Image: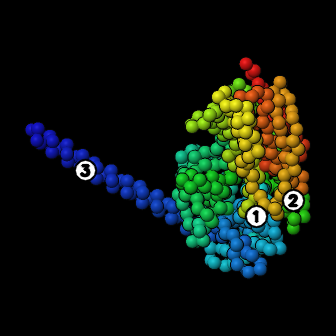
């Protein structure tokens, strides 16, 4: 009886395992069929975007795009066509349809902050994709389309993971592979509705999309500028963006925290990430550091990004060091702040700095306040503020603040408020 029961149980377990495997294979096959059907149905809505160097008549940048109306309006990323924005005479835009036909495209509008661009494909009748006007549930299957590595249009099955909550401007996070060349392509539901535009990847099968909400706002906006000079539009958008977040940051007192015997600015907004560490290894002084920085920047061109908000604090305590050695350590950190701003001589001027001593709540700082202006985007600056305390002989604080893409007035206002946030709990 026991043997019979054992065999009976073994048989059912084996059959059950086989049935489970069969059902799994059938489900996987069904998903594959669904993905294939989605691609087959909507591939004629997709295009490859090419930026052509007019001197060599060769492609310089590749990306993806898609039609959103029957008259040939194409959506892509700003960073895909950025060379044309900065050098319209050197670079032209063209696109390749699913039938391999090549056509010229004209840039109509841009959103540099959210990395979007609108092109006129100069067509009279095109198939197109609709934009989503509702939300979907986390975990739903979506399909990401684009032209990775110039290998031809492909489709990647992905999973919707909701909106990011730690970036200045919300993005959609998805589980799925986004590779170079897929930028500007759509991510769609099974019925072909666009939930977002492919924009970035982390390299770990996590990708990010610009939401269809920002795209709709861009399409509703009719530009009031010379369509041949998109630099003016870039300038306008950068200044509006920095005015918005600066107004919010300056509207309330800066939150502070203790670092050694000092109160220093802490995390000032949800979209800033902060880290801390202490270094005591084989050194005659104790050092503790904190850094806060924004996650995402704003792409301007291939070697120039902006939008940085970053500040660091370094606390030093050296009771066993003489004054000269301690000041030498402080001076090294003050003169070598290690900023991460980008841009070359074509993009920005040299930093112009002013150095002075400032006293705040019995805390005396040596302060360097520096600005550099954007050469092609007038009225927009990068700012660096570096300050070292000089109030005590065996402990001190060095702080560095960098802001990218900011107006002169906001650079000064934020710098003043930043310094006011420091306090010294004198022993």
Instruction: Judge by depth and name the residue closer to the eye, 286 or 305.
Output: 286
Instruction: Judge by depth and name the residue closer to the eye, 160 or 171.
Output: 171
Q: Residue at x 52, y 64 (%)?
A: 37
- Mark 3 crowdedness (10 Å alpha carbons): few <14, some 14-19, many ≥20: few
Q: Residue at x 88, y 38 (%)?
A: 356
Q: Is residue 326 left or right of residue 18?
A: right
Q: Are marks 3 and 2 in contact (CB under 8 Å)?
A: no
Q: Mark 3 sits on what residue?
A: 15
Mark with earlier residue (1, 2): 1
Instruction: Judge by depth and name the residue closer to the eye, 342 or 215.
Output: 342
Residue at mark 3 to residue at mark 2: CA–CA distance:
73 Å
Q: Is residue 63 visible?
A: yes
Q: Mark 1 sits on what residue?
A: 82
Q: Is residue 350 left or right of residue 268?
A: right
- Mark 2 crowdedness (10 Å alpha carbons): few <14, some 14-19, many ≥20: some
Q: Quadrant of residue 58?
A: bottom right
Which element carries disc 3, helix, strand or loop? Answer: helix
| Quarter of the image with the N terminus in it | top left
> Does residue 384 lie above or below 30 as drawn?
above
Residue at mark 1 to residue at mark 2: CA–CA distance:
16 Å
Q: Mark 2 sits on what residue?
A: 375
Image location (x, y in percent) of residue 94: 73, 74
Q: Is residue 348 left or right of residue 94?
A: right
Residue at mark 3 to residue at mark 1: CA–CA distance:
59 Å
| Quarter of the image with the C terminus in it | top right
Q: Is residue 269 visible?
A: no
Residue, far bottom: 56
Which element carries disc 2, helix, strand or loop? Answer: loop
Q: Residue at x 72, y 50 (%)?
A: 340
Which element carries disc 1, helix, strand or loop? Answer: helix
């Amino acid at each position: 009886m026991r043997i019979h029961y054992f065999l009976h149980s073994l048989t059912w377990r084996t059959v059950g395992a086989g049935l489970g495997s069969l059902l799994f294979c059938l489900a996987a096959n069904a998903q594959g069929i669904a993905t294939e059907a989605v691609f087959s149905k909507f591939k004629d809505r997709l295009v490859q975007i090419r930026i052509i160097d007019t001197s060599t008549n060769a492609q310089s940048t590749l990306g993806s795009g898609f039609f959103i109306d029957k008259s040939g309006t194409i959506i892509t990323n700003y960073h895909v066509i950025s060379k044309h924005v900065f050098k319209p005479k050197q670079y032209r835009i063209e696109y390749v349809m699913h039938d391999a036909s090549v056509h010229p495209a004209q840039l109509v509008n841009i959103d540099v902050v959210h990395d979007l661009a609108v092109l006129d494909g100069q067509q009279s009748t095109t198939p197109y994709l609709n934009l989503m006007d509702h939300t979907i549930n986390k975990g739903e299957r979506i399909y990401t389309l684009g032209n990775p590595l110039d290998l031809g249009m492909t489709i990647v099955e992905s999973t919707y993971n909701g909106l990011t909550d730690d970036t200045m401007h919300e993005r959609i996070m998805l589980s799925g592979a986004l590779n170079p060349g897929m930028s500007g392509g759509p991510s769609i539901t099974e019925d072909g509705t666009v939930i977002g535009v492919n924009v970035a990847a982390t390299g770990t099968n996590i990708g990010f999309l610009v939401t269809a909400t920002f795209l709709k706002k861009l399409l509703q906006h009719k530009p009031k500028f010379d369509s041949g000079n998109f630099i003016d539009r870039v300038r306008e958008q950068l200044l509006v963006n920095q005015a918005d977040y600066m107004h919010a940051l300056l509207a309330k007192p800066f939150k502070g925290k203790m670092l050694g015997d000092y109160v220093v600015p802490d995390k000032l907004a949800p979209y800033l990430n902060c880290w801390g560490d202490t270094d005591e290894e084989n050194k005659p002084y104790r050092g503790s550091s904190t850094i806060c920085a924004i996650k995402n920047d704003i792409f301007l061109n291939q070697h120039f990004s902006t939008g940085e908000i970053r500040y660091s604090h370094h606390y030093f305590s050296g009771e066993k060091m003489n004054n000269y050695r301690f000041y030498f350590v402080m001076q090294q950190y003050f003169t070598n702040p290690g900023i991460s701003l980008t841009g070359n001589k074509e993009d920005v001027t040299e930093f112009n700095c002013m150095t002075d001593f400032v006293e705040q709540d019995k805390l005396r700082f040596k302060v360097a306040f520096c600005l550099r202006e954007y050469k092609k985007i007038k009225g927009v600056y990068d700012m660096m503020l570096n300050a070292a305390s000089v109030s005590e002989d065996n402990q001190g604080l060095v702080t560095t603040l960098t802001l990218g893409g900011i107006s002169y007035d906001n650079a000064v206002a934020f710098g003043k408020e930043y310094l006011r946030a420091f306090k010294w709990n004198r022993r």
